[in-house]
Image (cartoon, rainbow, N blue to C red):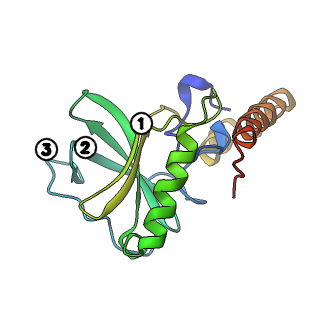
Amino acid sequence: MPGPAERRPETDATTPPSARSDVDDTAAAGASSAGAAPGFGPPLHAGEVGSLGPYRIVKELGKGGMGAVYAALDTRLDRRLALKVMLPQFAADPASRERFVREARAAAKIHHDNVVTVFEADVRDGVPYIAMPFLDGYPLDVFLKTKGNPTVPQVLKLAAETAAGLAAAHRHGLVHR
């Protein structure tokens, strides 16, 4: 399984580290899904997807039922990060937008090695987003294809890390959906 330095961008506060491939049961990086792209501004550099405030959107990492995750660059601090955004059809609903930001605020209260750090959560130009660390690595399906089934010790380590992250969330009264 990917080690701490090999993990993909964190996309959900309590998703196990080596199972994180994207938002809401997302397929592997670059996967496509029905629904329009978020309302990003024009790209600032050739080959990029677009911009959102101070963020240069470099590429899509994956897309799920309600959102997408992008590799981005925070131009204020010159750092790579993962930007989780809601798709337009869901962002148009005020209740969905508020729930998205509320969940990010709740996740931001948890400080644990197995729970994603939330740098920022907001709505900019009608696009709700969560800015999180970009962690190098690859999704579980790629690991399985390239390295085969994990060993029993790897599975036990993953289960322990997942349980520890969930326990940290539960201590804050949060329940993972």
Amino acid type, mark 3: His
Q: Which mark is residue 169?
A: none
Gap in Å between the C-alphas at discs 2 and 3?
Answer: 12 Å
**Residue 32 seen in this snapshot:** no
Gap in Å between the C-alphas at discs 2 and 1?
Answer: 13 Å
Q: Which of the pair 112/16 is nearer the observer?
A: 112
Vertical placement of 35 versus 48: above or below?
below
Q: Secondary structure at mark 1?
A: loop
Residue 150 found in image quarter = top right
Rendered-image quadrant of the N terminus: top right
Residue on which disc 3 sits: 45
- N-terminal of the pair, mark 2 or mark 1, is 2
Q: Nearer the viewer, mark 2 or mark 1?
A: 1
Residue on which disc 2 sits: 55
Q: Position of residue 64 (x, y in %)?
A: 51, 63
- N-terminal of the pair, mark 2 or mark 3, is 3
Q: Which of the pair 87/158 is nearer the observer?
A: 87
Q: Is residue 153 left or right of residue 172?
A: right
Q: Nearer the viewer, mark 2 or mark 3?
A: 2
Identify the residue at horizontal 82%, vertical 31% (top origin). 151
Amino acid type, mark 2: Tyr
Mark 1 surroundings: few (<14), some (14-19) or many (≥20) residues within 10 A: some
**Residue 42 seen in this snapshot:** yes
Residue on which disc 1 sits: 119
Amino acid type, mark 1: Phe
Q: Are marks 2 and 1 in contact (CB under 8 Å)?
A: no
Q: Position of residue 118 (x, y in %)?
A: 47, 38
Q: Nearer the viewer, mark 3 or mark 1?
A: 1
Q: Are marks 2 and 3 in contact (CB under 8 Å)?
A: no
Q: Is residue 76 left or right of residue 106?
A: left
Vertical placement of 15 versus 123: above or below?
above
